[in-house]
Image (cartoon, rainbow, N blue to C red):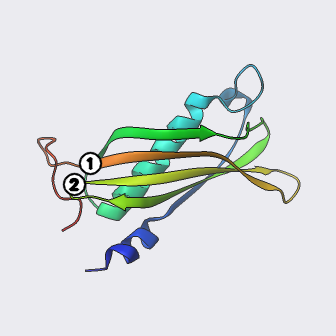
Amino acid sequence: MKLTDDLIKASETRIFKAIFPNTTNHYNTLFGGTALHMMDEASFICATRFSRKKVVTISTDKIDFTKPIPEGTIVELVATVNKVGRTSCVVKVDIFMEKMYDQSRELSVTGFFTFVAVNEDMKPIPIQD
């Protein structure tokens, strides 16, 4: 079995998305709820790849929106296991914004998502064997 550090590295998840008008608010920037949805999805994939078990989101913590993400940009979500407990793990998700037609890249949103591994009866189980 791989060491925890190797599993953390192997489970890092990266997703790219274009920000289209149907995902923006009345300021023509990415709607916060859409950003949270994308972050929860990326963190779920990361936690699943790390544990290879059924996991559920049990909490989010400290979501920092530091830069607005305008329509017409590309975002990269980077999800990495940040902490491992007995039945849970915490996944950090960063959203980086890139302009489509130049090389600029900025960290725009950071958040932490906690997942618990569950069995068929939705009862917590060890996240690692």
Name the residue located 17 percent from the left edge and 58 percent from the top edge: 126
Residue 21 x %, y %:
73, 29
Q: Which quadrant is home to the C terminus?
A: bottom left
Q: Secondary structure at mark 1?
A: strand
In the displayed structure image, the side of residue 74 where residue 104 appears, left or right:
right
Residue 116: numbered disc: 1
Name the residue located 50 percent from the left edge and 40 percent from the top edge: 62
Image quadrant where residue 9 sits: bottom left
Name the residue located 44 percent from the left edge and 72 percent from the top edge: 10
Depicted 29 relative to depicted 75: above or below: above
In the displayed structure image, the side of residue 124 where residue 113 appears, left or right:
right
* Residue at the far right in the pictured view: 102
Depicted 10 relative to depicted 63: above or below: below
User: Disc 2 marks which residue?
Assistant: 87
Amino acid at dot 1: Val
Amino acid at dot 2: Thr
Q: How many marks?
A: 2
Which of the two labelled residues, at mark 1 and mark 2, occupies the earlier sequence position?
2
Image quadrant where residue 29 sits: top right
In three-dimensional space, the C-alpha distance between marks 1 and 2, rounded to whole angstroms, equals 6 Å
Q: Which quadrant is home to the N terminus?
A: bottom left
State yes or no: discs 1 and 2 in contact (Cβ < 8 Å): yes
Residue 105: numbered disc: none
